[in-house]
C-alpha cells in the first residue's frame, strides 16, 4: 500500500486530496490539526506517532523529526541497503509528502505582532520533511502548493507521475523553503539600521508578462512579499499587462503619493508624467492633467488617487489610453471603460511604499532608502528680496510636490494646482527649463506669472534666466550650489521670488 504524509498549515483542498488518495488505496499519515480535520471528514488517518512510536511533544514542536519519517522518505528505492535498513527497523516507505509551512510571513505582516508570536511561526519539521522529499523526488512526490493537488491526483490516478513532474514539484518545494528561510532571515536581521550588512531578497513570480521592454525580451513580475503595491494589483479588464505598463503604473503611484488626500490625476509616458493636476473630483482632475500636454498624452497610463467615476470615464472617451489605474472604479465607470476591449483597468489599493529602493546593476544591486515626499516646510526659506504672494506660494507648494515624480534634471511649471509645462530627462538643467517653457507654450499655456520647481539646485544662473524670459514669477528649488548667490542674484534681477527647500528630490 502506498503511503502519503499530509501535514499542512494551509488546509485548502487537503481533505479532498487525502480522500481521493485514500479511495485509490493509499494510507494517509498525518499530524495534529491536519489529522483531526481529515478524521472529522471521514478520511482514514494513521497518526504520525503510530509510525514513530513517540508522541507529539512541546505543543507540536516535535512530531515529524524522527528516523521513521525521514528514513521512510529518504530511502533510495533502487539501493538494496537502504531498503534493508528500512525493513530492519520496521519502517515503511513514504511515497508522497504534502506539506506547507506555518504562516510566518503572514504573521509578521500583521501590525504590532510580538516577536515571541513571530518566532512560534518558524516551522522546523515542515521544511526538513519537504527537503527530504524533494531530494528523493525520483521516488517521492512532494507537494507544497494546494494549487497542485488536482494535477498531482490526476497523475497518480492515471499512473503518469513522470520524472518531469517530479522534478518540477521538487524545484517548487526548494523554492518555497528558500523563500521561507529568506523571510525569517530578513525578519531576524532587521536591526533597525536602514541599510543592514546583508539583505535577503525573496521574489515570487506573480505573473508572466506579454514581453519585456521590447517584444523579443521575455519578462515576468516577481513580488517581494511586501503588502500592497503592484503585488496587490487587480486587473478588471483589457489586454494582459506588459513590462512597460507596470513600470508606468508604478510611476503613476509615485506621483500620486505626494498629494495625500487631495484629488489628483497623473498621466504617465515612459515613467515620467506628461500631466499632473489637482481638482475637486476625478473628472475635472483628469481634464486639467490632460491639458498639461495633450500631444504627449496619447498612449499614456492615467492614474488617479481616488475612485474613478462615470463622469471621469466619459471624459477619457476621446483619448487612446494604455492603462487606467486607481484605488477603485465605480460600477458605471468600469462598464463604460470596459467597452474599450484593449484598455487595461487596474485597481491598486493605497499602501505605504517599501522602505528600500533597489536598482539592478551588473553583479549586484544599488540600494537606497526610498525617496518619500515630505510636505513639511520647516526647512523652507525665502532668499530673494521679494517674497512670493499667497497665490504664488500655493503654486510653489503644488509644483514642489509634483516635480518629485519627474526624472533627471526635472523642471515643472505650475499654475492653479496643475502642471502646465514639464522638462525631464535632459543632460543640463537649462535644457530642462527651456523644454518646460517650450512644452507649455506649445500646449497654449500662458507662462507669465507662473511658478517653477526644480528637483535639484541650479548649478548656473542660466536656468533662472530661461524662466524669467518666459515670465515666471516664483521659483522653488533645494539650493546647495556653490553658485547659489549668483542664482539668487539672477532671481532678484528679474523680480522673481525664490524659495529654497533645503531638500533635494532628484531621481535618476
Image (cartoon, rainbow, N blue to C red):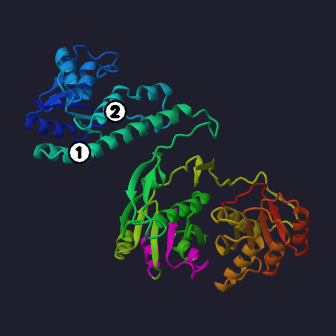
Q: Is residue 68 above or below residue 454?
A: above
Q: In the structure shown, which secondary structural element does the residue marked by tag 1 occupy?
A: helix
**In the rendered image of this protein, does residue 2 appear above or below residue 218?**
above
Looking at the image, which is closer to me, 208 or 407?
208
| Residue located 84% across and 72% down the image | 496
Magenta region: 288-317
How many residues crowd around disc 1 within 10 Å: few (fewer than 14), some, or many (20 or more)?
Answer: few
Residue toward you, 284 or 122 = 122
- Marker disc for residue 131: 2
What quarter of the picture does the N terminus occupy? top left
Residue 97: x and y in percent read: 24, 33
Earlier-in-chain disc, 1 versus 2: 2
Q: Quadrant of the C terminus?
A: bottom right
Up-down: is 102 above or below 350?
above
Q: Mark 1 or mark 2: which is in front?
A: 1
What residue does disc 1 label? 163
Q: How many marks?
A: 2
What residue sits 51% from the left and 51% below the top?
351
* Left or right of residue 468: residue 485: right
Q: Indicate the secondary structure of the residue bearing disc 2.
A: helix
User: Does the magenta segment cover residue 237?
Assistant: no
Image x and y of residue 307, in percent: 46, 63
**Nearer the observer, 288 or 157:** 157
Give the class, few, some or many, for how many residues have Cα within 10 Å of label 2's Cα (few <14, many ≥20): some
Residue at x 64%, y 53% (from the top left corner): 371
Query: Where is residue 222 drawn, in percent x and y?
Result: 44, 52
Instruction: Give yes or no for contact between labels 1 and 2 (Cβ–Cβ under 8 Å).
Output: no
Magenta includes 311?
Answer: yes
Separation of disc 1 and disc 2 at Cα? 17 Å
Q: Residue at x 40, y 51 (%)?
A: 205
Judging depth in this view, the residue of 281 and 441 nearest the camera is 441
Q: Say whether residue 507 is visible.
A: yes
Amino acid at each position: 500500500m502506498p503511503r502519503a504524509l499530509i501535514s499542512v498549515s494551509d488546509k485548502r483542498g487537503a481533505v479532498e486530496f487525502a480522500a481521493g488518495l485514500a479511495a485509490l488505496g493509499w494510507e494517509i499519515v498525518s499530524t495534529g490539526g491536519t489529522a483531526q480535520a481529515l478524521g472529522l471528514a471521514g478520511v482514514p488517518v494513521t497518526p504520525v506517532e503510530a509510525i514513530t512510536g513517540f508522541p507529539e511533544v512541546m505543543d507540536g514542536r516535535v512530531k515529524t523529526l524522527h528516523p521513521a519519517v525521514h528514513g521512510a522518505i529518504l530511502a533510495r528505492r533502487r539501493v538494496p541497503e537502504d531498503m534493508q535498513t528500512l525493513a530492519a527497523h520496521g519502517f515503511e516507505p513514504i511515497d508522497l509528502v504534502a506539506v506547507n509551512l506555518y504562516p510566518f510571513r503572514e504573521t509578521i505582516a500583521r501590525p504590532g505582532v510580538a516577536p515571541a508570536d513571530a518566532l512560534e511561526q518558524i516551522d522546523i519539521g515542515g521544511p526538513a520533511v519537504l527537503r527530504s522529499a524533494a531530494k528523493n523526488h525520483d521516488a517521492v512526490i512532494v507537494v507544497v502548493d494546494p494549487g497542485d493537488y488536482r494535477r498531482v491526483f490526476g497523475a497518480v490516478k492515471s499512473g503518469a507521475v513522470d520524472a518531469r513532474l517530479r522534478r518540477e514539484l521538487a524545484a517548487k518545494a526548494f523554492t518555497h523553503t528558500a523563500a521561507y528561510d529568506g523571510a525569517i532571515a530578513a525578519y531576524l536581521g532587521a536591526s533597525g539600521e536602514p541599510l543592514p550588512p546583508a539583505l535577503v531578497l525573496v521574489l515570487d513570480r506573480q505573473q508572466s508578462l506579454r514581453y519585456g521592454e521590447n517584444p523579443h525580451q521575455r519578462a515576468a513580475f516577481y513580488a517581494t512579499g511586501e503588502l500592497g503595491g503592484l503585488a496587490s494589483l487587480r486587473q478588471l479588464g483589457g489586454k494582459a499587462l506588459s513590462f512597460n505598463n507596470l513600470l508606468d503604473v508604478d510611476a503613476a503611484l509615485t506621483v500620486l503619493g505626494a498629494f495625500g488626500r487631495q484629488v489628483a490625476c497623473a498621466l504617465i509616458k515612459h515613467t515620467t508624467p506628461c500631466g499632473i493636476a489637482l481638482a475637486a473630483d476625478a473628472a475635472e482632475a483628469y481634464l486639467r492633467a490632460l491639458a498639461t500636454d495633450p500631444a504627449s498624452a496619447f498612449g499614456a497610463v492615467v492614474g488617479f488617487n481616488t475612485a474613478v467615476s462615470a463622469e471621469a470615464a466619459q471624459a477619457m472617451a476621446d483619448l487612446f489610453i494604455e492603462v487606467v489605474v486607481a484605488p477603485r472604479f465605480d460600477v458605471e465607470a468600469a462598464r463604460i471603460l470596459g467597452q474599450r476591449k484593449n484598455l487595461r483597468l487596474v485597481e491598486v489599493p493605497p499602501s505605504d511604499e517599501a522602505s528600500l529602493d533597489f536598482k539592478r546593476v551588473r553583479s549586484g544591486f544599488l540600494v537606497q532608502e526610498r525617496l518619500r515626499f515630505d510636505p513639511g516646510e520647516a526647512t523652507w526659506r525665502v532668499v530673494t528680496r521679494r517674497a512670493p504672494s499667497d497665490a504664488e506660494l500655493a503654486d510653489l507648494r503644488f509644483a514642489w510636490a509634483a516635480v518629485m515624480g519627474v526624472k533627471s534634471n526635472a523642471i515643472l511649471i505650475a499654475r492653479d494646482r496643475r502642471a502646465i509645462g514639464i522638462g525631464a530627462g535632459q543632460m543640463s538643467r537649462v535644457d530642462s527649463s527651456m523644454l518646460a517653457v517650450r512644452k507649455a507654450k506649445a500646449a497654449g499655456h500662458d507662462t507669465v506669472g507662473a511658478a517653477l520647481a526644480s528637483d535639484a539646485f541650479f548649478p548656473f544662473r542660466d536656468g533662472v534666466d530661461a524662466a524669467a524670459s518666459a515670465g515666471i514669477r516664483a521659483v522653488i528649488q533645494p539650493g546647495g550650489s556653490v553658485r547659489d548667490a549668483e542664482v539668487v542674484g539672477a532671481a532678484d534681477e528679474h523680480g522673481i521670488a525664490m524659495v529654497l527647500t533645503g531638500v533635494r528630490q532628484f531621481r535618476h
